[in-house]
Amino acid sequence: MSGKRKPEGASESSILRITPLGAGSEVGRSCIVIEYKNKKIMLDAGVHPAFNGIGALPFFDMIDPAEIDILLVTHFHLDHAGAVPYFMEKTAFRGRTFMTHPTKAIYKWLLGDYVRVSNVSAEEQLYNEEDLRRSFDRIEAIDYHQVIEVDGVRFSAFNAGHVLGAAMFLIEIAGVKLLYTGDYSREEDRHLMAAENPGVPIDVLICESTYGVQSHEPRLEREARFTTQTHQIVQRGGRCLIPVFALGRAQELLLILDEYWEAHPELDSIPIYYASALAKKCMAIYQTYINMMNEHIRRQFAVSNPFVFKHISNLRGMAQFEDVGPCVMVASPGMLQNGLSRQLFERWCTDKRNGILITGYSVEGTLARRILNEPTEIEAIGGGTLPVRLTIGSISFSAHVDYTQNSQFIYEVKAPHVVLVHGETNNMGRLRSALQDHFADHDLKTKVYTPRNCETVELLFKGEKIARVTGQLAVHTAEFVEGYGPSGAEVATTAAKTGAETEPTGGMGLAVTEKGQAGLTAGSHPVSNGSATPYLDGILVAKDYQYHIMDDTQVAEFTGLYAAEILQRQAVPYHGTRSLLRYHLNQMFGMVDGVGVEINPIARVQDVHHFAASASYRKLQIKSEAGEEEIQDTEVEANTTSTSPSDSIEANVFRIYNAVDVVYRGDLGVVELEWSGNHVNDMVADSVVAVILNIECSPASVKMTKSTCGHNHHPHGPADDEGPAEEDTLVGPFDSTLTSDHVNLLARFLARQFGPAIPLTAAERHALEPALTFGRVDTTPTSAAETEKKTTGTPETSADGTAEQEEDEGTDPAEPATSTDMKDITKPATGLSGNDGTIVALQLMVDEAKAIVDLRTLTAQASDEVLHDRVAKVLARVKRTLRPITE
């Protein structure tokens, strides 16, 4: 069922869901799952007293146990804790389990007895004693009023008054408070205190409805009726059977009987037995936790132990019992399904002198419930039927609230949502009607829900988001608010208009309450943006549904969070030259920056080939304010030795997009990449790796590595031992005249980099030259003889008799300049003709800076040095691009 339809646009995480997997319109196998803000909490995990095996479990198959974060157990009764070992050990649940100290102490013994007396085969048994032991070790014990926080979920236990250690649980998730009562009693008895009200505003109350609208008999009257009926049965020579749970009401009844026998000496000859395998152990536990009982017991304990009875004997089993004459037998279990109480009932039910007193709540489907209808016969455990002739009495000593106590508690809590569980359909329906009538009469909008098993109640809670300003930012904020406007009135007015409230909280900060979509902008001081509303500039930290705004310099101080940088390094096999590497990087990423630095190598690799084969070698270095940690992940381990700063070598580093450093390591045959890990930098690094891996098979690499070999092929000639020195200069100019296609391609190339390329004639170029101070060259027309020399490749002899060789930026010093320079264009290039003749240059403009490109020499002149260098680099790339690969 749905408690409230999901509004349009409502966030899924803002819906609170309550689903009974047991105890939904029934009594038994209590198990409630609440889900809110992606947190799932299970309340109790019991078994149904009327069923055996898997059928007694809650509907665990409706959930994924692995998603349950916390299991809270209210008390030790089987209908609330009987399935805990199964859920903890037989399912995927790996969350945390909590219960009070007395509950945990009794849990081990009570469930161990349940395993031993269950009337099922070993195959149908839900769990064994080993499962119980393992679950016991995982359970965490807590005290009343102790506040526990688990991943943003806060909860605490309050006295429920049902049995020793029984607890209500107050749970808070993201500001929404739920109270789960479990089984509770608002009446103080002979040894237990009444249930307490947490005394805080509750948003949702999950409450038991066991007795519906029934009211209990006053305590003194029912005690008198109980002792009278017991006295009558033994006085006529009969046996009085009182089936009870081993712990809980049994201790209350034993106190009453011991006191009554003490007051009636004529009954001294009639024994009272407490028949439970756990009797001695359980009484020891009760004596241990005297401090959790009421004032009457604590006062009596100062004189003598109230649980050391004078007239009551412990009976561990039938072998110790001599069934002669009248007696009183307090035996477990209380539902007569199995165990000592069932054996004694079948033995005594045929004698009309005997009697049985049902003192607690009887679950539908159990023998205790059936005999209340006074049947003439019953089915025996061993088969067959037995006549029922003994007298049957019912006196409610149940430690559950009646209608008067329950309704009064619900009215005191004043929760806007009440979910009823742990009650039969009729009782629950009557209680719901009575509560709704009361709320209607008092004009209250409280809603009451009665879900069945596996039906979900959905409640929408938008909640309030409170961000607390912390640290030095809080001091500045308080000063700012106090001084803002006349007496701060303007701040209050603005907050009211936006729906936000500002409340000085004292101490460390200022609380800002955000309702709906209104809020305070958190972006290290309060700032006024010119409007009526001030805003804060700080770091917003969210943890466990709590929000704090603080100065960025104090994040580590208040949160323990430290800014960290992941420095990644990767080595890629590479056997080419540095210039070839730079060429390919330029082609992919534009003109990369060269950074000459000294670095420590990642590792000294003794076996370069082995290292090159390990392409997946990677090292991560995490740097933070807290310190430095290194993590090395190596799929193929390289042979490495440690290095010191003195081992650092001069490296050639190219920086890509100011993000990835590419280190050329010719001595190791690798290229090392280093970058700060993030999504963008990782993408750039992946691209660089792809480029490097493709270099040695790229056709462009064939052209880039073309040069005269470094040794002498003549058998008698001297060999060049040094070989060609590695260089980073560019190859020479074109070996053929510039065609119109080349000019058009050059113009498009320059336009992509600098904008439109404007064609210039010789006159236009001459007019611009005075302003172009960088890269100026002699543009005087050459004579025919000079042109002939260039055409034939005859070098011009200088005054000292040596041949001069012109080198421009693109000339390879290791390669003779045998190619001819560019000739003057004798006819206009297609599409680039000027108004007065042949096109000899192209003009570029970047902002106020100008540059021209000489089409004869492919050199640049510019009014700005930076622009000149950029154009020169682009021209060098153009030369390499247009040179035929066969050359």
Image (spheres, rainbow, N blue to C red):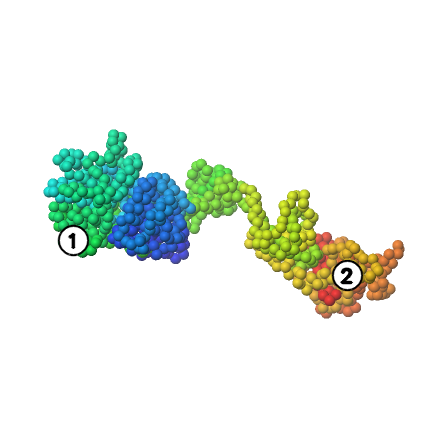
- List x then y, in percent, for residue 57: 31, 53
Relative side of 829 to 3, left or right: right
Q: Secondary structure at mark 2?
A: loop
Label 1: few (<14), some or many (≥20) within 10 Å?
some
* Amino acid type of the residue tagged 2 in the rendering: Thr
Residue at which label 1 appears: 386
C-alpha gap between disc 2 and disc 1: 116 Å
Q: Residue at x 67, y 61 (%)?
A: 696
**Quadrant assignment, res 60:** bottom left
Label 2: few (<14), some or many (≥20) within 10 Å?
few
- State the residue in front, 85 or 691: 85
Give the farthest residue toward the top.
Answer: 303
- List x then y, in percent, for residue 302: 27, 30
- State the residue in front, 368 or 184: 368
- Label total for image: 2
- Is 140 situated above or below 90? above
Q: Is residue 567 visible?
A: yes
Name the quarter where the C terminus is drawn: bottom right
- List x then y, in percent, for residue 555: 51, 42
Q: Residue at x 80, y 56 (%)?
A: 720
Give the farthest residue toward the left.
Answer: 236
Q: Earlier in the sequence, mark 2 or mark 1?
A: 1
Relative side of 711 to 74, left or right: right
Q: Residue at x 70, y 66 (%)?
A: 745
* Amino acid type of the residue tagged 1 in the rendering: Leu
Q: Secondary structure at mark 1?
A: strand
- Is 376 situated above or below 856? above
Mark linked to residue 708:
2
Residues tagged 2 and 1 counted as in contact (Cβ below 8 A): no
- List x then y, in percent, for residue 616: 59, 55
- State the residue in front, 835 or 604: 604
